[in-house]
Image (cartoon, grey):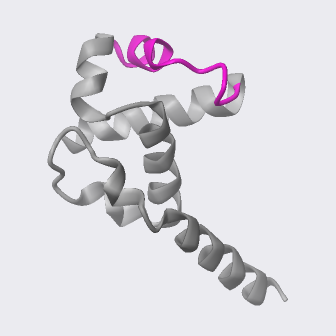
Amino acid sequence: MNKRLRQIYEVSSNLSINKGYARTQIKDIADGIGMSVGTMYHYFVGKTDILSFILKVTIEPEFMEQDFALPIQPVLFSSLGDEIKATFAAREDAFA
């Protein structure tokens, strides 16, 4: 499963950076991986959860290595905003 999640992470990150998050559709991600849109919904509830997954893995790479119940639920990202703020604060302190 982690191989497929890594593919989703890489393709969706690339598309979001190059096309923009708003213009990236689930279909674009699915096409980039070579899977159906229906299969994408087996892994994630929606596009917002894919973005949350990208952000979470970016600040905590080992997050991807755990076993997930599918589809990955939004509750896993309930504290993501605070985690992002803490990461920026730590980086700011290290930079200063």
Q: Quadrant of the C terminus?
A: bottom right
Rendered view: 2 above or below 37: below
Q: Position of residue 78 (x, y in %)?
A: 42, 62
The quadrant holding residue 23 is: top right
Query: Is residue 35 among what the camera can see?
Result: no
Q: Is residue 13 left or right of residue 62?
A: right
Front-most of residues 86 and 2 = 86
Q: Quadrant of the N terminus?
A: top left
Rendered view: 85 above or below 46: below
Front-most of residues 54 and 10 = 54
Q: Residue at the location (28% across, 25% down)? A: 41
Span of residues in magenta: 20-34
Query: Is residue 93 among what the camera can see?
Result: yes
Q: Position of residue 18 (x, y in %)?
A: 70, 26
Q: Residue at the location (77% across, 81% down)? A: 92
Q: Residue at the location (33% across, 56% down)? A: 75
The quadrant holding residue 9 is: top left
The total number of labels drawn is: 0
Q: Position of residue 11 (x, y in %)?
A: 48, 29
Q: Residue 32 colored magenta?
A: yes
Q: Position of residue 91 (x, y in %)?
A: 70, 79
Q: Residue at the location (57% across, 65% down)? A: 81
Q: Is residue 69 left or right of residue 47?
A: left
